[in-house]
Image (cartoon, coloured by chain):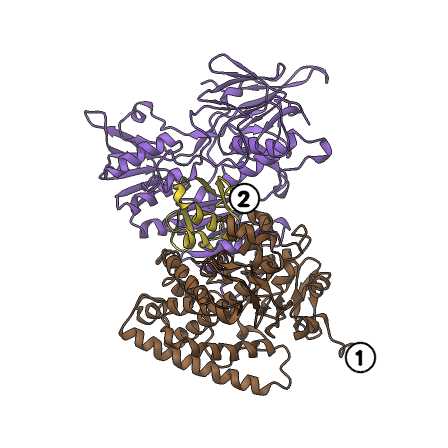
Amino acid sequence: MTAGPIAIVGAGLAGLRAAETLRREGYEGKLTVIGDEAHQPYDRPPLSKQVLTGWVASDHTTLPRLENLDDVDWELGHRAVGLDLAEKKIVLDDGRDVPYDRCLIATGVRARPWFNEAEAELDGMFVVHTTDDSRALRTRLAAKPKRVLVIGGGFTGSEVASVCRMLDIDVTLVELAPAPLSGALGGVIGAIAADMQRDAGVDLRTGVRVDAIEGDERGRVAGVRLSDGTHLDVDVVVVALGGIRNTEWLTGSRLAASALGIGCDAGCRAFDGNAIVTDDVFVAGDVARFPHPIYGYQMMTLEHWRNALIQAEIAAHNMISAEADRRPHVSVPWFWSIQFEVNIKSVGVPTIADQVVVTQGSTDDRRFVAAYGLDGTIVAAVSFNAGRYLEYYERQIQEAAAFPPVLDEVGQATGDDPVPAAFPPQSELTNRPTVVLTGHSPTEMRVERKFPEE
Amino acid sequence: MTETDAPTLMDQITDEAARANPWPLFEQLRETPVARQPDGTYVVSGYAEIVALLHDPRVSSDPNKRPDGGMTGGGIEPAFINTDPPEHDTLRRETTSFFGPPHRPDMVAKLEPWMHETVNRLIDGFADREQIDVVDDFAYPFPVSAICRILGVPPEDEPKFHDWSGALIVALGLRMHPEGHQAEFQAALKANQEMTDYLGALAEAHAKDPGDDILSGLATDKGPDAMTMESIKSTARLLLIAGHETTVNLISNGTLTLLRHPEHIERVRNEPEYVIRLVEELLRFEPPVQMVPNRAALEDIAVGETTIPAGAPITLVHAAANRDPRRFADPATFDPDRQDGVEGQHLGLGGGVHYCFGAPLARLEVQIALRTLFRRLDNPRLVEDPPPYRPSPVLRGPVHLPIAMDGVHPA
Amino acid sequence: MRVVVDLTLCQGYAQCAFLAPESFKLSGEEALMYDPAPDDAQRERIMRAVAACPVRAIFTEPAPGADA
């Protein structure tokens, strides 16, 4: 086992779980955890649910510590601004270095801000990602705004809309795709989510985007103009357009870091820019871009709670294990969302599927399971208020079972035929680097990455 | 003696002689975790295998879907335990709406003070005795009072249920060896009819003058999932029987286990939360429900190397799986501290959509019963070990559990 | 106390919501919302919930057994 020191960059769920795992597995050396927020590691999912409803205070989601972490150097409220692979050190924003023998990068994502900076500065504009964001939005919701506009119909946006309806607040949700949740679950399931929202009284507008947000003379949000020409009076806007991976700080580091995440192997070891796996740099959580054997070793990044947890445990274990004892991160992805009194859970990766079929239950009752297939093999499943069955589907996915699953005699099978899953096309990332090869002889050849102009 | 005449392992397990100590037989059973029986039933005793089947939509609990028609009460509307989704989900949800969250979230937790009073009153009654029968004097009366209160059965009618459910449980235990027991089956049918008629009359009385109990709720509900009177009667019958037969055995099994392992008694007395983990370990170690013999495969189901064919009856032996060494370290050791986390996860209350309906009530009752009993009894000790057992291999527990003591401390 | 529930494991058995209703609430019939910072006075009820969870999805600080 390494004598250390070990540095963990990122003090969220992944960073905390990695620290706990290191201590639990017997690492006794110096351990530093660096986090840019001045808070002990805290849990994010409640921030878009029971904190917004007012039941739980925004600073009450500090995560329990499952191991003794007294002997850890907590560098909270300090941002990492660089990583020196050769010198093996993390550089902090105040100029200090944190040397490491092994390090783990778990810097997560930040909320994507509204693209128009002037509009983003208006009083009444919110994102929901940090405890401070959540407190600010909760305060505004408690004051009973006239109308909330949610921009983005992904999971977070839908959860915010759900809370608004729970608080009897008028809410409009604007989503560019034909249905909410369609980016993650496809258009067929998205259509069910759309019905769910409308039944709850959400003013759902799909196939449109927000062109402009207007402020009043006091710099407060007053209205919005949509791309179909509609104008709405709103006083609160929640921007729920996903996250940006916190990888910019690694631009000069020669690691394989980009907006897509930090490339790593199945043991969570980071690749450098030449796609050579490093010895001492590990990655876990939302920033990790890793190959998944069940999905043809496709590289994927997941913004899932459980992925952060499991990957952090594996990365930490591998950081202090002999080669023969390393474990791969191959578990099937899981996800959940709570909205409109429905427990939505998914297992696997729906986005690679070409077909979907409702296998159990009733979509009208919002109590069903649907399976996803790719080329006749099951790759994912989603349940609405039917979570006890997903373990069966997980096993089917692990065993690359045939799609659709044979459930004809099962009383609650719907008898539906598979249909195209209708995932909307992925939008182009604007800041993906172009990769070029440089050098003349084999020993000189290297990969150089040219980043687009800002 | 031909191969088919020799008693199978399951024959031995279900034989009354095995009741006091079935564990060596379960160990043999686990050698073949999915074992086809001569009659085509598949007996499953491995932990991972049972968990997989409990969450598999292709496994049915509805006897009407079995080619052999299963073993039913005959002509009586099934309660949710014997139905599959979607009917199951509607029945169970409707019943839950008068018992727990989201509609009645406080119902069980609010009973805690009443439970303490009831348990202490029963124990106060032991003050001048040197010996009690834990079953008759404690483990039976307490859960029966609790379920009658929750269901809306007046306390003065409780003695009727002792005889009725006794007859039904005897018949349940004999179903696997029905030969020569016609008298018991007749008695069970009569008890079933009398109990059902009684519950129907009670439901109608509550409909006119409702309380906050489950029967009043079911009888007065006008919502979309409201039950027919036939369903109300069979649901009430299920809750009544399940609500005490199982909990009685958990309290008796728990008392017996503590007296066999007295090193835990001090911890129960001195560590307020120890009994919480202890009751979970009891559910693993001496579960009151040993097996569920009423499942069937609706499609071919591959479990490990074996395929259970569509139509085959399935028996899940939870008690054997609870001591599966592939899952539990030192499975034959009674160790409540293992219940701190995922290592302790057991099948004592089942799993999947049919997970025990009354589980929170049972847990609270047994935690309070055992902690109070062992705090207040002075030098409790077994009089006979093993005690005599009820014949049922499904609902296992002592029929009497005599214990001696030196006195009773005040509450 | 601090509590976190692994909602990936949660299948809505609701034992927690029965046994510690101030701290665990169902939203609809299966979704769980909970208080991650309950009062220490809720400790016994929360320990009941932790032990009763059939999928052992509830984690706390202090951990169970800390009263020993």
Q: Amino acid at mark 2?
A: Val
Residue A145, which numbered label?
none
Say which quadrant the N terminus of chain A sits in: top right
Q: Nearer the viewer, residue B398 or A154?
A: B398
Question: Residue B142 location in percent, x, y?
Answer: 45, 66
Q: Is residue B122 left or right of residue A201?
A: right
Q: Residue at x 42, y 24 (%)?
A: A38
Residue placed under numbered mark 2 in the picture: A349
For label 1, count other residues whose C-alpha is less than 10 Å away and answer few (under 14), some (14-19) or many (20+): few
Picture quadrant of residue B303: bottom right
- Shown in brown, the chain is B
- Shown in yellow, the chain is C
Question: Residue B144 location in percent, x, y?
Answer: 44, 69
- Shown in purple, the chain is A
Q: Residue at x 34, y 45 (%)?
A: A162
Q: Is residue B35 above or below residue A388?
A: below
Q: Is residue B215 above or below residue A363?
A: below
Can residue B402 be seen?
yes
Q: Amino acid at mark 1?
A: Thr
Residue placed under numbered mark 1 in the picture: B2
| Outermost residue, top side | A95
Q: CA distance from mark 2 to mark 1?
A: 54 Å
